[in-house]
Amino acid sequence: MFRLVWKVFFLVLFVVPGADSRAQQHGRKAHKGLLNEIDKSLTASVGQYKLLAQHLPEDRFPVTYYEASKKWVTSGSEPWVGGFYPGGLLYLYEATKDSFVYAEALRKLKVLEKEQFNKTTHDLGFMMYCSFGNAKRLAPRPEYDTVIINSARSLASRFNKQVGCIRSWDSDPGRFMVIIDNMMNLELLFAATRLTGDSTYYKIAVTHANTTLKHHFRSDYSSYHLVIYDPKDGSILKKQTVQGAADQSAWSRGQAWGLYGYTLMYRETKDPVYLQQANRIAQYLLNHPNLPADKIPYWDFNAPGIPATARDVSAGAVICSALLELSGHVNGKTAKTYFTAAETMLRSLCSPAYLASVGENGGFILKHGVGNYPKNADIDVPLIYADYYYLEAMLRYKKASRR
Ligand code: GLY
């Protein structure tokens, strides 16, 4: 009863009464100048990906590029990044209708397809929904539905009832490892429930999000990177970082995954608890004293040496895209705050400080990403996932301008 009253109270106070409400329109009015920048960037990005495509073997996916040695780093279809290149190409096709980028996306989907049966990774949402989800959205085909359903089935096979989570890494069977990144994979499960009518996927997503909400967050709403559970009873063995500066630090991309993850949970369920969590994460990020004026974060909000350390454009792009969506789920001043912050981020990303000149950067779109700082891997380089969320953010901004 109390929960119901709280839900109604929350909905009346904070949630947008209708997608076209005047308050929302007011808070999310797109700027002509930025729209022009975005259009220029989208056209240039098509040119960049045509260049990138020339350097890709048929069965490989781009990861990053090292300018000093002029070396492209590529992967097979199995790592977590496989879906971003076809997904980014599909966003570019949506924006420009360029036939080359569509054909290139379809070629790569063919290579990626087999991962629908991969049960060794929790990254299937990144891999199969950023790619096949977008392909289905633009041109539905029954074979895309099959891939999405099989991928969700593979992802669901990693769910443990005792823990209430989907397992992230398999490296130690006695320690059930869950990283905040895993929130991003839940979108695939909602799609599978819509396609099959089987609520199992939906319930797994909700249970995973609830367990993560309970255990991954600190009192200031920053999150741990990794929580290790006992697989037998779900008790917590350890909370720590892997890619962040310290166990108690706020690894920037992890915070971005959390923000995006709870925003999508609200979109899919309309449970105000998730909206409240997304709002709390957004407040934490936007009010953080170490968030630079251009709003592109350092690789960790508590990185040693700030300001003399690397920015992470991938965290910036994910936060930007998430804020654009979140601004549509709230109203008035809050909507305006999120939308304006996302605009600042987009202006930064569209500027030469982060956007590569045409013909440079190995064909990647953005510069200055950080893959794994503690491992000394991929620091201050382009990253395919930074490009993907940047393209998504630009399209979201253009859509907001049409409402
Ligand atoms: N999911 C891996 C990363 O964010 O680096």
Image: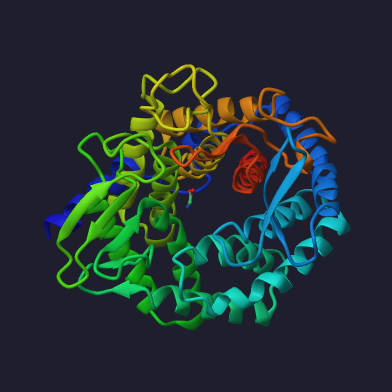
The quarter of the image holding the C terminus is top right
- Please state which of residues 327 and 341 is positioned toward the viewer in this rendering: 341
237 left or right, relative to 393: left
Task: Give the colour scheme shown.
Answer: rainbow
25 left or right, relative to 63: left
The residue located at (14%, 62%) in the rendering is 235
Task: Kindly give the residue lying farthest to the left in the view shown.
Answer: 2
Measuring from the top left, give residue 7's x and y in whole percent: 24, 53
- Res. 379 image quadrant: top right
Q: Visible in this render: residue 315?
A: yes
User: Residue 173, relative to residue 390: is it above or below?
Assistant: below
The residue located at (50%, 27%) in the rendering is 341
User: Residue 134, relative to residue 37: is it above or below?
Assistant: below
Task: Kindly give the residue lying farthest to the front in the view shown.
Answer: 69
Measuring from the top left, give residue 6's x and y in whole percent: 19, 50
The residue located at (40%, 56%) in the rendering is 183
- Res. 217 image quadrant: top left
User: Residue 73, relative to residue 175: is it above or below?
Assistant: above
- Please state which of residues 245 and 205 is positioned toward the viewer in this rendering: 245
Q: Visible in this render: residue 193?
A: no
Measuring from the top left, give residue 22's x and y in whole percent: 51, 37
The residue located at (46%, 61%) in the rendering is 185
389 left or right, relative to 338: right
The quarter of the image holding the N terminus is bottom left
Image label count: 0
Measuring from the top left, give residue 78's x and y in whole percent: 58, 67
User: Residue 191, relative to residue 157: is it above or below?
Assistant: above
